[in-house]
Amino acid sequence: MAPSLEWPWRSLADAAAAVKAGAVSPVELTRVCLERIERVDHALHAFVSVDAERALQDARRAEREIQAGRSRGPLHGIPVGLKDNYDTLGVATRNGSRVFADRMPTEDATVWARLQEAGAVLLGKTTMSEAAWGVDFPPVRNPWDVRRNPGLSSGGSGAAVAAGLCFMAMGSDTGGSIRIPAGLSGVVGLKATYGRVSRAGVMPHTWSLDHAGPLSRRVEDAALVLGLIAGHDPRDSASASVPVGDYLADLKKGVRGMRIGVPREHFWDRIEGRVATVVRQALHDLEAAGAKLTEVSIPHMPTALGAILVTEMASVTAWHDKYLKQPERRAKYTPEVRALMDAGKLIFATDFLKAQRLRRALTDQVRAAFDGVDALATPTLPLCAWDISESHVQIDGQPEHVLHACWRFTYPWNLTGLPALSVPCGFAAELPVGLQLVGRPFDEATILRAGHAYQEATRWHERRPPDPVARAG
Amino acid sequence: MRLPSLAPVADLAGYPLSVADLAEVASILESIMEDIEALRALDLADDLEPILSFRVEPWV
């Protein structure tokens, strides 16, 4: 059996197999994670709340069940984290906001209900930015460099997984908030096709763009979790009635003969040279593993930012409107988020509908780009993790707001609803870089297969960040 | 800031917006206007209907 302190760095699949075989107990796994959270999370702030007593209680029950020869499922006794916008019965769910500081759900989010059925143990809720939009307090730190940002609203989930505080954490993604922290924190992030994973019980941000999905250290772990949480849910009006495949069955078939398109426009403009170099090498690695790369064109891609901006601003304001009208609640939004929501009131219906027409045009062009290819590959981000104190970065000699820069390569796949996976593909100046793989609708299996093949061919995912406590001084 | 000229904007929100609120809103709108103008400038085909959410049909 591996030494206890090694467990937080093992994959979820390894840990689950070890629990099933009796090589490690759920209590031991949970204790190791809790001890690690206790030791290092004061330097990271990845968790906004941890319920150690409840986690150990659930782990003891899981252990008794194992001893009695009963397995709940593939996550039996595995400690996980949930972003603070997933409803959890009896555990506060605050959406990262003082507006919901006392919110106690009376029902579990469907995803959490399914993870529980599979045996998962909840360690706590991971830190998120206010209403998945503003800043987080205190700011989550990137485990690779605690002076830097781990990436937008699921940053706590990314940091928790990267720092070995849990085996998997759930995030949500409206414009990239699963893939951006995955890219910046050196972990795997999966946004499945819109409608593939239920959002019931996940606090809404933008109805037509929101996705729920896992962050993990291995693609295999993301595939395992997707198999558990995917599938139709009558509680979510956008949930798709599309059969769920066995995402582990073809995972190891490799990429020999797989046709991967690399978009010509947008994704190689205004990108840090060091990031482009790492991602180009990753593409060569996929080619060396047998994939066939080809250039594709999506002309509308560079013009789509306005479409997601007006869609998001109008939608967020529409959901929060009733709280904004209540003076005592309105005062609890931070001025920055409140101003964004007020500005959402001024999005014209004509612009909103033009945005949805552009979505259609973009979708048509992306569909055409998929003619003759099985997946697309792009960088996940145009930059590496930025200093927490910075609001602007220089990319290609041009100043750009970090929030503007960081989602440029991810939001198109929210507008089009396609499945997208970020896989760690190397480092630039000791900071992680992500490769983004995009699939056809409901074909998560192909991008998971490509991502797994890449991880089998490289070892980036085995690198561990420095001790955050020592780094924080 | 001349509030009277912005009063209809404040009214549009449906709840009181102070002068400071309006200044913040103006700043945000200014920061995104370039992208909204680009969206407005796009010449899309007349028969292109909006999709209000993801639909699998175009892919079938």
Image (cartoon, rainbow, N blue to C red):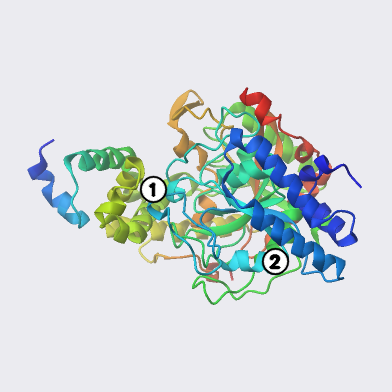
- Quadrant where the image shows the C terminus of chain B: bottom right
Foreground pick, A301 / A47? A47
The amino acid type of the residue labelled 1 equals: Gly
User: Badge 2 is on which residue?
Assistant: A228
Horizontal and vertical percent for residue A401?
43, 33
Foreground pick, A229 / A241? A229
User: Badge 1 is on which residue?
Assistant: A306
Extreme-right residue of the structure: A1
Contact between marks 2 and 1 (CB within 8 A): the answer is: no
Horizontal and vertical percent for residue A350?
28, 59
Foreground pick, A256 / A20? A20
Residue A367's tag is: none
Which mark is nearer the camera, 2 or 1? Answer: 2
A167 vs A230: above or below: above
A5 vs A255: above or below: above
Residue A288 lies left or right of residue A55; in this view the side is right
- Quadrant where the image shows the N terminus of chain B: top left
Residue A183 lies left or right of residue A96; in this view the side is right
Q: CA distance from mark 2 to mark 1?
A: 35 Å
Residue B32 lies left or right of residue A446; in this view the side is left
Instruction: Please rate how many residues cluster around mark 2, counting C-alpha atoms within 10 Å: few if below 14, some from 14 to 19, many from 20.
Output: many
Q: Secondary structure at mark 1?
A: helix
Tell me the subunit letter for badge 1. Answer: A
Residue at image position (55%, 56%) is A366
Extreme-left residue of the structure: B4
